[in-house]
Image (spheres, coloured by chain):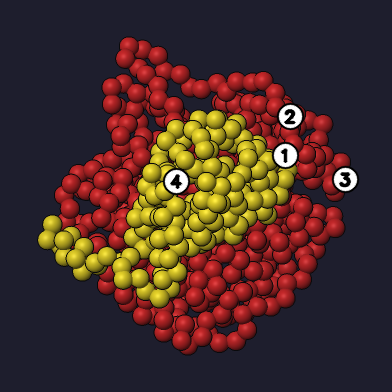
Amino acid sequence: MIRILRQIFRTGIVTEPAPKELQGIHEIGTQLQDVIWKRFSRSLTIRQVDAGSCNGCELEIHALNNAIYNCEKYGIHFTASPRFADLLLVTGPVTHNMEIALRRTYAATPAPKLVVAVGDCGCNGGIFGESYASLGGVDKVIPVDLIIPGCPPTPTDLLLGLLKLMEKMGAGA
Amino acid sequence: MSALSKAIADALGEDARFRPGQYPESVPLCIVPRARFVETARVLKKAYALLAAEWATDETGFGIARGFGIYACYRYGSEYIVVKTEVPADDPVFPSLTKKFVAAYRFERQIESLMGLTADKHPDNRPWIKFEDWPANAWPLRKLFDASGKMPRVKGDYKWVQAVGEGVYEIPVGPVHAGIIEPGHFRFQAVGEAIINLEERLGYVHKGIEKRFESLSWTDGSRLAGRVSGDTTVAHSLTYCMALESMTQCTIPARAQWLRALFLERERIANHLGDIGAICNDVAFAFMLYQTMRLKEMLLRTNQRLFGHRLMMDRVIPGGVAADIDHQGIREILDEMNSISWEFEKLVTIFDENSSLEDRTRNTGILTPEKARDLGVVGIVARASGLNLDCRIQNPFPPYDVLDVQVPVLIAGDVHARVWVRIEEVRESIRLVREILLSLPGGEIETPVKPPLPDIAGFGAVEGWRGEIIYWLQTGPGGEVNRCMVRDPSSLCWLGLEQAIPDNIVPDFPLCNKSFNQSYSGHDL
């Protein structure tokens, strides 16, 4: 136990003080936080759906939760069920075999049913294109509010993308 | 002549025809009559070989008389052999190997589903990857299939394995899971908390990758290979490139070889770190996840800074690599290795001293050495269950031939063993990264690759972080891609998970699954 405590205290809080390359993130995060506080009663709940990705995007979405990006401190939280979600974060391309599951997940999500398509494949099918097995981008199956391109997008790209969407929401309010 | 070639030649005599045209020449191609295909498998099993992959090709592009080909790749020690049998287009049936090698079970269902060749005497004729709502005659790997359009959906049912009896109940899980993970369906039959059977159903992320290769150029193929399974991008593009380079007799510069090994080991460290943390997190020891993810993030950032991509996608290209390193970069990685190694050892001590972690991970999700061997699993799963398999040792490409790689082999086969194999491999990979950087040869990092000749084949096998990856490429009449067979370690190891689950309790499933951590995308293709 003493070793665990020592490791925790020695590690300290890695999110603060933000090193140079993290400075940007901190600003993005604070802006995001304002919108999340106003629009979503302090917490934006995300359900991630892999609709056919190569799992590269999932690695970077995971990284959002690590101690360095620590997205929870801005009120961004990943949930286990679409029924609690404000936003679906969908990676693609949408496969023929996942189309129905994705539609059902969308149907189970309450309003405002925001959808963000992540990665080049989520945007337009990427290198997998459109074929018998791949339907292409997420917008081929459900309405998409925002795309975050990249192969895969970095955690910073993901945070920036979410901020863009929040701005759009804020402008519409 | 290799031991496996000799065993076949002795048993089949004139019927075994060794055919040139498959590269590297150290991996022979032997054509046997359809009626003696199973006998060949029996002979090889007697010679202690394991089935590494089985796949089909549509060779009607060379003339209708060529029909289809069924290929089985066997491995014994450092030898590989590919055995082919020809299947005429008007009689699309081949003898099943499943009763000799369990590993063939899903390969053959997949051949039947995607190529439309019937596996004779296969114990399970349900489709695999192909879902019940696909049209019955949709065989995408056939040349006549039009892959460009959307498929209509038809009505159909999947026949699940059933369990009946007092107190038996069923838990369906997926395809959309609770965490940030890939989609797949698991169906448990349980009595109380104990699982009596697990049935996996995969195929949700089938993107038609193997068919897609056939419409891409050889260069674009390496980009696609890098996206078969994003977490293994380096190893997949590397295996593809090695198969292509062996076909074109391309010798890449020494510096490129060493840099490839550097990328491969960095990918291994990053993924193992993530896995060790995630496994601990699944037994509610979140501390470890946050610690290892921090170390992983350090590695990814260094990748971005030095090589221009966090996961090093598209850094391995046909003919070499697309990113070099200078003295400053070498210094930076050496410093990083020192600090990661120092931190990691502290975490290992904490892991090792934590009795509640040990309580949850020991004797959980056991894949016995006997089962592991029967199923032919590879990589970390195999090495935690007593099988000493590692392409870096058995089929080393430079620089592994001079690095003297040491890997742990444990026999417990439980979650604890799979964590411990990863821990030892992180240590070894840190050592390898240091050695590679200290003796990195100078020179070019890329050489041009000629287009391959028509009607030849190329084979590549590389130890990715999950285990052995195999690519087998075949050129068509015009030197284009006729077939690109991808065998991710997941194709074999998913069977292992199914066998490791019975007798465990339902809440331990996520832990067991995480300790295998197989790729859905790499399996579904």
User: Where does residue B440 sit, x and y in percent of width and height?
Assistant: 49, 83
Could you tell me the amino acid type at mark 1?
Tyr
Could you tell me the amino acid type at mark 4?
Arg
Q: In the shown orientation, is residue B321 left or right of residue B293?
A: right
Whole-number angstrom distance, CA of label 4 to CA of label 3: 65 Å
* Colour applied to chain B: red
Q: Name the residue under label 1.
A: A132
Residue at mark 3: chain? B
Residue, x 36% and y 40% (percent of image)?
A: B510
Q: Is residue B483 above or below residue B454?
A: above
Whole-number angstrom distance, CA of label 2 to CA of label 4: 41 Å
* Quarter of the view holding residue B22: bottom right
Q: Nearer the viewer, mark 2 or mark 3?
A: 2
User: Where does residue B228 sit, x and y in percent of width and height?
Assistant: 59, 53
Q: Nearer the viewer, mark 4 or mark 3?
A: 4
Residue B232 appears in the picture as rendered = no
User: Where does residue B93 sit, x and y in percent of width and height?
Assistant: 72, 31
Q: Mark 4 points at which residue?
A: A39
Residue, x 66% and y 75% (percent of image)?
A: B251
Q: Name the residue under label 2.
A: B152
Q: Nearer the viewer, mark 3 or mark 1?
A: 1
Residue A82 appears in the picture as rendered = yes
Q: Are marks 4 and 1 in contact (CB under 8 Å)?
A: no
